Amino acid sequence: MLKSLMDARSQFRGQKVKVDQGGFDNSNLPEGIYTGKIVQSKIEDVKRDEVMRPAWTRRIAIVGGDCDGRSVFPFKPLLDDASGLTQSAKDLRAILGDVVPGKVLANNEFELDLDKFMVQIEDLASRCTGEMVEIRVKNNKKLKDDGTPWQNIYINRGLGADAKGVEKNQTQAGTVAKPRRVVKK
């Protein structure tokens, strides 16, 4: 046994403590707008229709408010499908800015270069970890087995420089002073 661990053990001989048996809170969040921090963002294989397919997986921790510390998991867009790639590009542009390969056309549409994007997506996804974002939580009409609605998580925007105001709880022009939640009545 490690000597420092043995030394620490001596102070706990014969002691017993209670361990909280609480589990993961997987209940729905109230619909609304939240501030969150992307704590995990990576490309990995996920099972869809019994087949393993590449997808962008994310976990976002809510920062502030009644739901502080709760996690949400946006839908995992598939990266072997053009619609999944375009959804990923849209979210990456919202979070990181103009880093996605492509160009803005005359009609203000964004033309995504799929081949170049697929080369860069792993790096871009990993760069999202630690970024602060504004998200919208909205209930879906479809219900889970327990009767509660599935929830859709939309990334409205990356907070970029505004994140400093959220982290320090400061009020300045152009910053978000406190996370907010808007609940429908």
Image (spheres, rainbow, N blue to C red):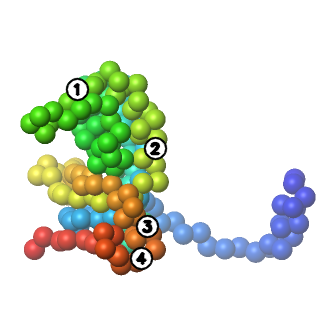
> Crowding near pointer 3: few (<14 within 10 Å), some, many (20+)?
some
Distance from the alpha carbon under mark 1 to that under mark 3: 35 Å
What residue type is disc 4 on? Asn
Task: Tell me the quarter of the picture where residue 64 sits.
Answer: bottom left
Instruction: Name the residue tied to disc 2.
Output: 127
Q: Is residue 27 visible?
A: no
Task: Say what amino acid the circle numbered 1 marks.
Answer: Ala
Q: Report the Cα–Cα distance between label 1 and label 2.
A: 22 Å
Earlier sequence position, callout 3 versus callout 2:
2
Q: Secondary structure at mark 3?
A: helix
**Residue hosting label 3:** 164
Position of residue 157 in the picture relative to residue 8 (left or right):
left
Gap in angstroms between the C-alphas marked 1 and 4 = 40 Å
Q: Which of the two discs, 3 and 2, sits closer to the camera?
A: 3
Give 97 or 64, whichever is nearer the viewer. Answer: 97
**Where residue 153 sits in the image (x, y, percent)?**
25, 52
Instruction: Determine whether label 1 and label 4 are within 8 Å by CB.
Output: no
Image depth: mark 1 or mark 3 in front: 3
Q: Earlier in the sequence, mark 4 or mark 2?
A: 2
**What residue is rendered at 35% in x and 76% in y?**
172
For mark 1, what is the residue?
A: 82
* Callout in the foreground (1, 4): 4
**180 or 48: which is nearer to us?**
180
Q: Residue 34: image x %, image y %?
A: 29, 65
What label does residue 169 carry, if any? Answer: 4
